[in-house]
Image (cartoon, rainbow, N blue to C red):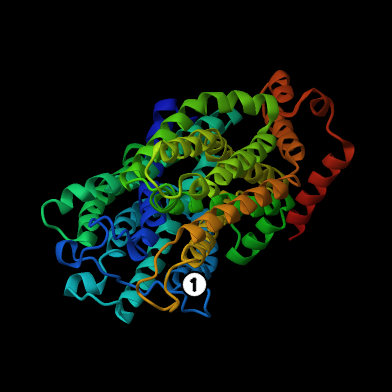
Amino acid sequence: MKTRRLTKKEMWIFAIGQLGWSILSGIISAWLVAFYLPTKDKTNPVYFSDTTLNFYTLITPGLIIGGFLTILGLITALCRVWDAVSDPLVANLSDNSKNPKGRRFPFMKFAAIPFAVVTILIFICPSLISGGTEPTGWNVAWVAVMLVLFYTFMTIYCTPYNALISEFGKTQEDRMNISTYISLTFFAGTLIAYLPFVFSGIVRGFGVGYYWSYVICFIPLVIIACVSMLIPTLLLKETDFVEPKPAGTNAFKSLTTTFKNKNFLVFSGSDVMYFIGLTLFQTGLPFFVKVTMGLDESWTMYLLGGMTVLSAAFYPVVSKLVSKWGKKKLVIAGFLGLAVAYVLAALAYPITHNENSALSYLVGFGVVVIAAFPMALLGIIPQSIVADVAEQDSIVTGEKREGMFFAARTFAMKLGQSIAMLVFTSLAVIGADHVDTASNDISAHHIGVTIVAIVAVVFCLLGAAILFFYNEKKVMKTIADHQLEEGLITEAEEKELVGEEEAVDAPAEEATEVEEAKEEVTEE
């Protein structure tokens, strides 16, 4: 069956799917904590006025689990237990699918609508429907069940979607283009998820309560997300670009084989650190803005928008830098740059003292400017690295298990988000005025938020340190040799991919290693 490469227009159509699911993911990252652990500001009636805005706490936010965990943090952590099961199962089902319409699109089409519906249901807990004003166990149970469903449908959509990055990216150029486009739509989706910071106040102007004002703002975003997720499945035909060939392996064997790949293990460890840092930025930004900088919450949207635009401006540069410096060095640079942005965020309160002043805006813009380029690097390159490792593994083992590799990355993303939520909800309340840690009056405090920024610096440095052990030259050499053998690239392009010295002759021991790996697969 003859397949073809995607045109750039078709790559953009594919990238719209990322816009959809990143809106939904962004809503959870930006709003789950802010919605159920709202920041109080008694000088501003927007945040604290029972009579005007029907403001109250839906879930007890105190450190009531062992004195250091919140209910919300525990719920998100337990969701990872289910993910540990669902991610490889969905990946294996997708890899082994015999659907004549393709291995990936049918899963994406099935998941899109329920994924969107569950996202909005997370925020419509029983107390909002009944009009209750006290936190209840029903609210906790509702959020727990809805989050499990959210991450399940997220897995069913995202794991096949991400596997297509490797399958659609038939060349390094295609891979970098696809990674660039979906990174742009990812940041656009994340930006869209912050729109309620601007429009919820307008909705409240019509007499709508505090929580419902946000739910009303979420609804159109969820509709946009759902349509966006369906667009690639409706406008593209998967089998035009990828041969629907089942992998032919069971879930357990596929998973264990995937994690036997040392380079993937190293990358996964680093990737978890990246998603912790990214989620801490997304979740913490509203709190940095309000609690440590003293700015109005609407500035969350403005600062994130500025960072997104500035980051996008760097995208054309990233591809050129990759060809010169390689992916590994640039991702490490991204981690270090993000760490610097967090250092400034940690200094926000000592500099501004939570007073709305010129210094507050200067610190906010400083964080945005410093974080923009690292976000561009970390937004584009890691997806391409996973595709590289998956392709190298398929060359060595003879098995096409892209779904399993990207399932592992989806799990890394959700694990990182979960750890970040756990860290943020546990640390952000440190320094709260009330001694009773189970009190409903506890909310984020500038001491806790500053500690969060310091912890984020540590995670970023860990991510950079772990990635030092990734053997990029070996991965790219295997791919380049195979593509040269298949006539997909020229010798000049091979030298560009792996460098002059490595491209001259494949080391004898590396060739032997590939052959031995193939023999092992044949024997099994």
- The quadrant in which residue 188 appears is top left
Question: Is residue 381 placed above or below 133 in the rendered structure?
Answer: above
- Of residues 302 and 404, the one drawn nearer to the viewer in this rendering: 302
Residue at 47% from the left image edge and 57% from the top image edge? 446
Q: Nearer the viewer, residue 137 or 485?
A: 137
Crowding near the residue tagged with mark 1, few <14, some 14–19, many ≥20 C-alpha atoms within 10 Å: some
Residue at x 26%, y 77% (from the top left corner) = 134
Q: 510 above or below 452?
A: above
Picture mark count: 1
Name the spot of residue 214 as percent of width and height, x first. Answer: 25, 55
Q: Position of residue 424 (x, y in %)?
A: 49, 61
Q: Label 1's element? A: helix
Q: Identify the residue position indicated by label 1 in the image.
A: 78
In the depicted structure, whether residue 464 falls above or below residue 498: below
Amino acid type at circle 1 is Leu
The x, y position of residue 512, in whole percent, is: 85, 44
Front-lying residue, 496 or 62: 62
Q: Is residue 261 visible?
A: yes
The residue furthest top is 492
Q: Among all residues in the image, which is located at the extreme left?
A: 206
Q: Nearer the viewer, residue 49 or 504?
A: 49
**Whether residue 245 can be seen here:** no
Assign the C terminus to one quadrant of the image: bottom right
Can you give x and y, in whole percent of width and height, for residue 440 in the image?
Answer: 35, 74
- Compared across the picture, whether 433 is left or right of 200 comes to right
